[in-house]
Image (cartoon, grey):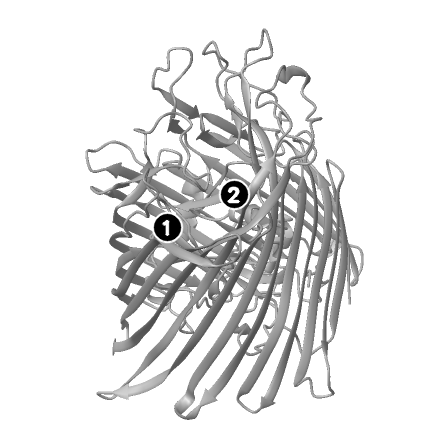
Amino acid sequence: MQSMTVFSSSPRPVLRPLPRLLHISLLSFAAGTVLPAQAADAGATDVTMPAVTVLGQSMASTEGTQSYTTGEARSATRMDLSLRETPQSVSVITRQLLDDLGAVRLDQALAQTTGIQVGQNDTERTTFYARGFGINNLQIDGMARGGNAPLQDTILYDRIEVVRGATGLMGGTGDPSATINMIRKRPTKEFQASAGLIMGRWDDQRLEADLSTPLNAEGSVRARTALAWQKRDSYLDMYHERKTVGMVILEADVRPGTLLTAGVDFQDNTPTGATWGAVPYWNADGSLANLPRNTSWTTPWSTWANKQHTLFTSLDQRLPGNWNMHLGYARTESTNRTTVLYAGKGYPDPATGEGMKLWTGAWGAGKNTGDNFDLYASGPFTLLGRKHTAIAGWNGGNQRSRSLGGEAEINYPDFIPDYRSWTGNIPRPVFHPDGSHTETVTRLAGGYVATRLSLADPLHLIIGARSSTYRTDTRSYNTQGVYTGSGDFAETRNEVTPYVGAVFDINKQYSAYASFTQLFNPQSSKDRNNRFLAPETGDNAELGIKGEFYEGKLNASAALFHTQKKNLAELDRSVPPGFLLPDGGQAMVANGAGVTAKGVEFDVSGQLTAGWEASGGYTYLHAAEADGRRAATTQPRHLLRLATSYRFDGRLAGLKAGASMTAQSATYSESWYGRPPSSEMTNIPQAGYALVNAMASYAINRHASVQLNVNNLLDKKYYRNVGFFDGVFWGEPRNISLAVRTAF
């Protein structure tokens, strides 16, 4: 449900003095932003935040709190730990922050999150990076997101938890970048409903509805549904998207201590005018192309249509001795119909309009099915006179991907005669299936045990290990549907991933922590011979300090991190230009010597003063190859994210104003084919830049509000990707949206 600004009868907010260490840190990375004057009266009246209703797994629910932080996050260890008690860097994108940012897609939310870099190859393929590496661990309620999923819409989620660093204990893959866990909204015992209309630039229209209601007088059985419909054009020529997304979820307190949950969610994306690549950085003569931001050499019928739905259920049981057990299952099915065309090869000649060649991808309907399981039990125990916590569990799943065999009928030349007058008016390819198909089956599962030991009143140690098994193969079936054999086989058995973390409470506000884990990450990348690369291995260490202020309404952290990762997939530059694998992918090689990434990170989130919320952080990243060369060159060494809002009182009651910004240092990508016409190897640079966004909302009354968002306020020109096939992908120009919402 969209949260609303609620008029308060509390005394006028009084600004509270910030902790000095936090105050200095904020000033240092806010680039000159000045904090309001501190109150001289330390005993001034405080404004308390709305209470959070505890419902089943919604113990850290952020909806309705008006806060940019939360009390706890379970994505790192599954234990009920506060952010301060978790020995890793954690950011939580709360429901309020999502609403204030106007972030209706996952990439919009992560683009304002500490340490996360968002890249974009084309209109439909968005990638995320952190701490020098790609992010592969995307979860929903702690279970792996379905394969081939469209970019998630955020209307379904209460919050998004981001754990930076490796979480191999919980997920089986020790990816040292980050884990992104999207937490669904839950039904409430009290009736609540909301609806919204959002209109934006480029004919963007969006309708939202959210309803939660008890189904009996006691509220022991309750339901919730959230729905959104959107259609929009784009700053890119010919692009249009239509999307529907929704969820129905039921909860029942079967008996005291037993909670049963079941639901279904779906998302249907139908883009047309979709791209399959970026625009060239250079002209054919080696000069900079600097093409307009709206340039798109696609067709009106080019599409990556995708439908996905997930059936999910869980059982939470309170056990004797204050233990709890959780059993969860989710089945995700997605289908896609992809017929794409794009002029992504070559370099344009401004004098003749020639030089660009077409890529065509036409496939029959593909289908992905994923079954995911999650079972664990946790609770306290006593040893040597002290109370501790233990957890044991098993999770994982099977993923099955089906592709049809056949050929596409293509009735147009493979080049653009003159890109200056291109309209995309060519016939759509027709795919003719021949009855054959392939199925790729991947299994990743494992068990884990961990304990949080209270060694002394201020000292806690988390120690555990996971044993994982991974297996994948591709099975072929002929035109009669008869199995003919398997290939692309890879298997790893009983891979043990240890984890250790320690937290020392310095005082009631500050804690120091350290954590270490080893890495194990099976790869989907293949070499030039179409064989999977060996799994990535390595280790990840982190050392930091965390602070919790104003009874948990404000959280802050500072961390040092160090990661060494081997067998990292890199482009194979020994293959001929344009070389592609049978599945259309790029040939890769494993960097056996590895990459070392280290850096510093600051993060803050929550209430700075009554009515003033902030979220943001700064990351310094130094990534290097074994020979000292800079690695992860498309990720900035300096990355700053800040978002803030202020809720006025008194005569301006109901008004909220806010702003957000991101600033990053320069990046570059090594050219793939070399700068024309000599093919001299060089870099494709992206200069440092800053983006500024603004928002303002007004609560007309207790049931209606309006909100204005302006993204890229200064209309900065920048690239969201550099180097993909020696191309660049322009970031979105200034965008304005207006939302009208009602709630009951």
Identify the image quadrant of the C terminus: bottom right
Q: Residues within 10 Å of mark 1 (few under 14, many from 20)?
A: many
**Disc 2 to disc 1: CB gap under 8 Å:** no
Q: Secondary structure at mark 2?
A: strand
- Which residue is labeled 1 in the image? 177
- Between 336 and 267, the one nearer to me in the picture: 336
The numbered mark at residue 588 is: none
Residue 259 position (above or below residue 345): below
The numbered mark at residue 126 is: 2
The residue drawn where x is 49% and y is 15% is 288
The residue drawn where x is 57% and y is 82% is 260
- Say left or right for 553 vs 541: right
- Say left or right for 466 vs 53: left
Image coordinates of residue 170 in percent, x first then y, are 37, 67
The residue drawn where x is 41% and y is 38% is 581
Image coordinates of residue 292 in percent, x first then y, are 61, 21
